[in-house]
Image (tube, rainbow, N blue to C red):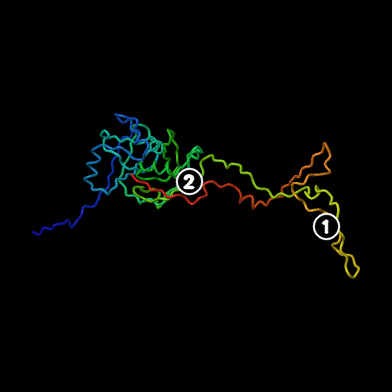
Amino acid sequence: MFQFGFNMFPEIPRPFDATYQCFSVAMLPGNERQDVERGGKIIMPPSALEKLTRLNINYPMLFKLTNKKSKRETHSGVLEFVADEGKIYLPLWMMHNMNLDEGDLVQIESVSLPVGTFSRFQPLSSDFLDITNPTAVLENCLRSFACLTKGDIIAVQYNQKVYELLVLETKPGDAISIIECDMNVEFAAPVGYQEPEVPKKRDEEMVLDPSDLMPEPSGFVAFKGAGNRLDGKKRKDSSSADQGASKPVYVRGIPDYDYQIGTLRFIRQTAKPKNNENQENDEFKPFSGTGFSLRART
């Protein structure tokens, strides 16, 4: 009988499939677990760990959660195996996404998800714009997540305030793993966001010529006379040339010597009509960048 030092027929991983009663983290016995509420991982019973070990599943452990009543699905990782037998504990935002109530049944299956390369989020409130660096806040939050699912509304806690973000898009699939990955992130305009009114530049022209305010030149003025043609004919532009020559050059700072008490004269400006095409190009467009690079670790 031949004996070999290695396994010629490695064990094929088998899927994990079980049904549990789900409860929110607030129902977990013991101290309050805010770390579970802020992340995207669940707590399972110890028997699930024993079964997963026997099945030889792939790591990291990722699961698809299904509510058969509402046909809603999401994905998550596992944080601990300390729940009571037959029960699992979920973050509250995850229960809302799946339309689950306390004690409802949830089907859990082990899955293998592709590593994420891109995701796009939409804040559900314009208050999210008040955060100085939203990318850093999101990156810190995603450290407690193992995966993302398109259509989920995740909760981000910052400065004792909860912000909800809708996962609009994920690549390369509708569900991705974000464990040790480089992922580009983009933000869409928040729900109910209104563009601020930005003052537009106007093309203005003078109504009153400032040279009209200059005093008439006195004394000797060089080249004051009008020019003549050698053939005796009148110049075609003589009228405009004479008018231009009679006007003195405007110099700022010279007072109006013809000022009369009780009168005020202002140099007003009028706006030229603007092209519709130029107006569209000048409009403010929020979140028009190419996105940001995010490094998420769990």
Q: Nearer the viewer, residue 29 or 210?
A: 210
Q: Which residue is mark 2?
A: 187
Mark 1, other Cα within 10 Å: few <14 / some 14–19 / many ≥20 = some
- Outermost residue toward the bottom? 231
- Residue 36 at x, y = what percent? 34, 36
Work out which residue is located at the far front of the displayed protein and give it.
219
Q: In the rendered picture of this protein, how many numbered marks are placed on residues? A: 2
Whole-percent x, y for residue 281 in the image: 61, 51
Q: Amino acid at mark 2?
A: Phe
Residue at the image position 82 percent from the left and 41 percent from the top:
259
Query: Which label sits on residue 121?
Result: none
Between circles 2 and 1, the one closer to the viewer is 1
* Callout 1 amino acid: Ala
Q: In terms of secondary structure, where does tag 2 sit?
A: strand
- Residue 140: give x, y in percent of width and height: 39, 42
User: What element does badge 1 sit on?
Assistant: helix
User: In this orientation, which residue lies closer to the viewer: 258 or 188?
Assistant: 258
Q: Position of residue 34 (x, y in %)?
A: 35, 33
Badge 2 local density, few (<14 within 10 Å), some, or many (20+)? Answer: many
Q: Name the outermost residue toward the right.
A: 232
Tell me the quadrant of the picture where the C terminus can be found: top left
Q: Kindly report the distance in space between the C-alpha atoms of the residues bearing marks 2 and 1.
A: 62 Å
Q: Relative to the observer, which residue lies in front, 167 or 103? A: 167
Dot 1 corresponds to which residue? 245
Cβ–Cβ under 8 Å for marks 2 and 1: no
Res. 84 image quadrant:
top left
User: In the rendered image, which quarter contains the N terminus?
Assistant: bottom left
Q: Please report whichever mark, 2 or 1, sits nearer to the chain's N-terminal start.
A: 2
